[in-house]
Amino acid sequence: MYAKFFKRLIDFILALVGIVVLSPLLLILIILGAIFMGGNPFFTQERPGLHERVFKLVKFRTMDNRRDANGDLLPDEVRLNKYGRFLRASSLDELPELFNILVGDMAIIGPRPLLVRYLPRYNEEQRHRHDVRPGLTGYAQAHGRNSVSWEDKFAMDVWYARNISFPMDCQIIVDTVKAVLKRDGISSETSATMEEFMGTPEGVVSEWSLLRLGHTVPIFNMIYVDKQRQLLNESEIVRKSTWIFWAYGILISIYVACLLLGNIVGIIVGIFTLLIGLYIACKIDLHINRDAYEVGRKRRITAVEKTIQEFLGKENLTFEENLAFIEWYDINFEKLLPKKIVDTISKVYVIVVSFIIYMVSKLIDASNSIDVKHGLIVLILVFVLQKMADSSYLNNIIKYKNSCHRAVTGDYKEYLIEEKLNLNRDV
């Protein structure tokens, strides 16, 4: 009822009142625009509106018409002068659009009217932003303006078009005022204005849509663990792991014993014994359990595939859609606080534990006083051990990363690429 009848009536009344009340300000801005812009203070351009019907948008000009030696307009950041920046930051450049609202081309609240040349670049979902009149401000403008991606902006526009209500319009007005006062999102991260929309690559996921639905990395991980548990019973091969835990225990015991000796030679022997022992143990483990690891890899791939489908609520995803989601997951997984804490601990735990054991051995042995120089040498040696343990070079030699619990999407990403290459080869 509100969207079909009362919204347009309210827009007409507010636009008419706004033009009357703000007429002195409009007159001042017209004069200032003529001075600072060196001529016509207005900017007019054809824009698509309701049902993609084209109309002529009117705004205050924020960029001058300076051109280079070839007669081409200079870049936006050059033509956007201080007066233009002030108009954009305060959103005063939008005031002439009250006339567009008055005649019915626009509304107070709605998706912003964009360029006509964008129309063929929209996908089917994004086209629904034109199911309503474009607005002076909108949900996307109140939540990021030019600082959010095109995909997120269009997702917000479509969501608004499908959920119009009077309380929401009132909230958007309040949020817009807050955004203007805070001067949020005036420019994008890489340009003085918003970069041109060239079309959304197939499969690119709107992060805003996922977050709005409560779709976050922890939620994905919970679904993934559940899928893993469901598929676990289907695995008939059990990994033979008892012996390797004994091997780890013996190697670590030898290393600790060497540390407790408290001399440099012992520590060096302990370090190399640990590294060489781990290398041999991991190689043997990979050989003995190669079938179990391959089954586990396939199970992880299937679990991730099913999790993505449930997460996005869509089956038969394309290669691009899957890959785009994997990239979204990897980026946001790195932002998680627990992930950062674990990464930090993994970079120092060998150093901290080893040095504590060494210092304890010195304290227990009352006959030996703590030598600072000797302690620093030990710390350096243990630091070398830590860096070697973290190095991708060592991981590549051992190939042990194939048997460890990997990043949730690691195996699946490799699987997608392999499948794509095989498909292209067959074609």
Image: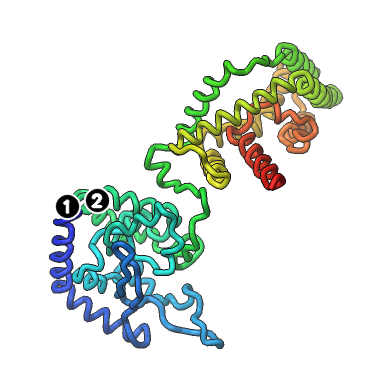
**Element assignment for label 1:** helix
Question: Residue under circle 1?
Answer: 2
Could you say which is closer to the camera, residue 154 or residue 330? 154
Residue most extreme to the front: 427
Q: Is residue 30 above or below residue 382?
A: below
Question: Residue 309 at x, y = what percent?
Answer: 49, 35
Residue at horizontal 74 percent and vertical 37 percent from the top: 391
Question: Residue 121 at x, y = what percent?
Answer: 46, 61
Amino acid type, residue under disc 2 in the picture? Ile
Q: Judge from the rendering whether residue 90 lies leftward or rightward of residue 20; answer left or right.
A: right
Could you say which is closer to the camera, residue 53 or residue 409? 53
**Element assignment for label 2:** loop
Residue at horizontal 27 percent and vertical 79 percent from the top: 29
Marks 1 and 2, Cα distance to the nearest angstrom?
A: 8 Å
Q: Which mark is residue 164?
A: 2
Q: Judge from the rendering whether residue 313 lies leftward or rightward of residue 110; answer left or right.
A: right
Residue 194 visible in the snapshot: yes
Label 2 environment density (alpha carbons within 10 Å; few <14, some 14–19, many ≥20): some
Residue at horizontal 40 percent and vertical 75 percent from the top: 82
Q: Judge from the rendering whether residue 323 lies leftward or rightward of residue 379; answer left or right.
A: left
Residue at horizontal 38 percent and vertical 66 percent from the top: 114
Amino acid type, residue under disc 1 in the picture? Tyr
Q: Which mark is residue 399?
A: none
Contact flag, marks 1 and 2 (Cβ < 8 Å): yes
Label 1 environment density (alpha carbons within 10 Å; few <14, some 14–19, many ≥20): few
Could you say which is closer to the camera, residue 372 or residue 184? 184
Mark positioned earlier in the residue sequence (1 or 2): 1
